[in-house]
Image: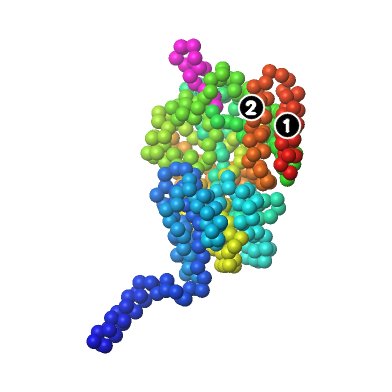
């Protein structure tokens, strides 16, 4: 009987050692780092590898850091993620490290739930902020303090229906095209193609005042969001340009579906959508019947060929008791070349390390697609990320932008002088900003 018991114990020990299960026994690990993550793609496209990069990173990280285990809760979809994270924070069970969706970054900072990373950055001689794209790194900064590190990003680029341009005898714009080029092409392609008296081919859809402001060098607010500069000449030029584009459509409200049907020449989209639908057969499924590609955004007379960047960041909980280990994990996920390279394989975004994006071996991810035969230059992509506009960070930024959006629509719909209407709307916005202080 005793002998049988000893054999059973021995077999259990052998099984534990062989299966690594012993590593999960209480007391084996000094620290357990919990990660907050969602199950689907940040870029809202189908992705069956949502945990692959994280799991590969965890495996390598635990090998490098004996005594530390990293775990995460699976099955939380992006739509429910921020609510789940907020509940964890309220219950005092927040993950040590968690991904932060762009639209919630300001809210979390203002709620005081993100730990300031500046002390970790300044106290770590091995950390090199310059390895990250400047615009992506600044995405995690709020009023001069770093609260998050960039994990992956996507710049906005201009999608082009090449078939329309070829049919109209127009050349594909170059990387340094301008508003004048953009408007000229839009005006030439906008027409009634079937002769029924209604416009059915359009120049552009989805090009917004924000796109125009970004590419014309507009600084819309001061650093703390206390004053709006809508009356700046560069801003007024942007509003006028949007009005000119709208006039081409003769009052018809063009939808993105029109682009998918092949009836629109230009539509701004995130690079992630280019990645998702450029590969065969998804490109055929999404955009049937025409050739398409993308290029930089057109430059305004006072600006450059730039747009804004959407960035998924990684932050540390203010309540974590594993600060040093959490910092090492954050650095590994965002700064390890091999892990960052996997973004090209398992995601639709762009790595945040310049050296990874510009690596020759990653050109394979932009090889010619069967439907178009075109190759996106890594240098064009890299420049688009590096030069992208950093979104301002101040209290109630989103509501301030909503006020500007309302003001721009009122200006465009007004029959009065644009200069006078802009002054009135700017005064209203500043009154709103003052009330929020």
Q: Earlier in the sequence, mark 1 or mark 2?
A: 2
Residue at 53%, 40% (x, y): give it: 270
In the rendering, at what x and y percent does residue 28 appear? 46, 75
**Which color scheme is applied?**
rainbow
Q: Is residue 385 magenta?
A: no
In the rendering, at what x and y percent does residue 389 appear? 64, 42
Residue at 43%, 27% (x, y): give it: 261
Residue at 47%, 54% (x, y): give it: 342
Residue 239 sits above or below residue 110 on the image: above
Tag of residue 428: 1
| Displayed quadrant of residue 268 | top right
| Displayed quadrant of residue 24 | bottom left
Q: Is residue 201 magenta?
A: yes
Tell me if I can see residue 194 in this picture: yes
The magenta stretch spans which residues?
A: 190-204
Tell me if I can see residue 358 in this picture: no
Residue at 72%, 29% (x, y): give it: 425
Of residues 292 and 431, which is closer to you in this image?
431
Of residues 315 and 208, which is closer to you in this image?
315
Q: Residues within 10 Å of mark 2 (few under 14, many from 20)?
A: few
In the rendering, at what x and y percent does residue 134 appear? 64, 50
Of residues 436 and 176, which is closer to you in this image?
436
Residue behind mark 2:
409
Mark 1 against mark 2, which lies toward the viewer?
Answer: 1
| Displayed quadrant of residue 208 | top right
Q: Which secondary structure class fits the magenta region best?
A: loop
Of residues 164 and 245, which is closer to you in this image?
245
Quadrant of the rendering where the N terminus is positioned: bottom left
Please, which residue is most extreme toward the bottom here?
2
Please, which residue is most extreme toward the front here?
91
Q: Residues within 10 Å of mark 1 (few under 14, many from 20)?
A: some
């Amino acid at each position: 009987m005793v002998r049988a018991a000893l054999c059973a114990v021995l077999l259990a020990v052998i099984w534990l050692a062989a299966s690594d299960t012993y590593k999960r026994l209480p007391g084996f690990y000094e620290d357990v780092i919990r990660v907050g993550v969602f199950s689907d793609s940040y870029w809202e496209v189908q992705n069956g590898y949502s945990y692959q990069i994280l799991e590969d990173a965890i495996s390598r990280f635990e090998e490098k850091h004996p005594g530390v285990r990293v775990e995460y809760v699976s099955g939380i979809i992006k739509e429910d993620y921020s609510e789940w994270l907020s509940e964890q924070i309220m219950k005092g069970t927040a993950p040590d490290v968690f991904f932060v969706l762009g639209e919630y970054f300001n809210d979390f900072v203002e709620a005081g739930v993100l730990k300031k990373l500046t002390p970790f950055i300044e106290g770590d001689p091995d950390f090199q902020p310059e390895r990250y794209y400047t615009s992506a790194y600044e995405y995690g900064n709020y009023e001069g303090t770093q609260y998050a590190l960039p994990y992956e990003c996507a710049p906005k680029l201009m999608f082009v229906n090449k078939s329309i341009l070829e049919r109209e005898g127009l050349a594909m714009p170059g990387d340094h095209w301008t508003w004048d080029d953009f408007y000229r092409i839009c005006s030439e392609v906008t027409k009634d193609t079937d002769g029924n008296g209604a416009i059915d081919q359009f120049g552009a859809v989805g090009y917004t005042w924000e796109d125009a402001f970004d590419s014309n060098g507009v600084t819309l607010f001061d650093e703390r969001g206390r004053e709006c500069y809508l009356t700046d000449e560069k801003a007024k030029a942007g509003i006028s340009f949007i009005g000119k584009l709208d006039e081409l459509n003769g009052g018809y409200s063009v939808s993105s579906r029109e682009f998918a049907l092949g009836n629109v020449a230009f539509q701004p989209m995130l690079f992630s959508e280019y990645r998702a639908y450029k590969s065969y057969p998804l490109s055929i499924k999404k955009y049937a019947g025409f050739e398409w590609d993308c290029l930089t955004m057109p430059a305004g007379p006072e600006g450059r060929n730039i747009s804004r960047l959407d960035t998924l960041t990684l932050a540390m909980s203010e309540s974590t008791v594993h600060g040093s280990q959490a910092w090492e994990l954050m650095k590994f996920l965002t700064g390890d070349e091999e892990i960052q390279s996997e973004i090209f394989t398992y995601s639709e975004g762009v790595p945040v390390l310049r050296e990874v994006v510009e690596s020759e071996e990653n050109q394979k991810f932009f090889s010619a697609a069967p439907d178009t035969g075109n190759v996106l230059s890594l240098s064009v992509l890299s420049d688009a990320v590096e030069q992208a506009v950093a979104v301002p960070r101040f209290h109630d930024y989103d509501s301030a932008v909503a006020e500007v959006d309302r003001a721009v629509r009122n200006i465009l719909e007004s029959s009065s002088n644009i200069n006078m209407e802009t002054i009135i709307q700017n005064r209203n916005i500043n009154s709103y900003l003052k009330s929020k202080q």
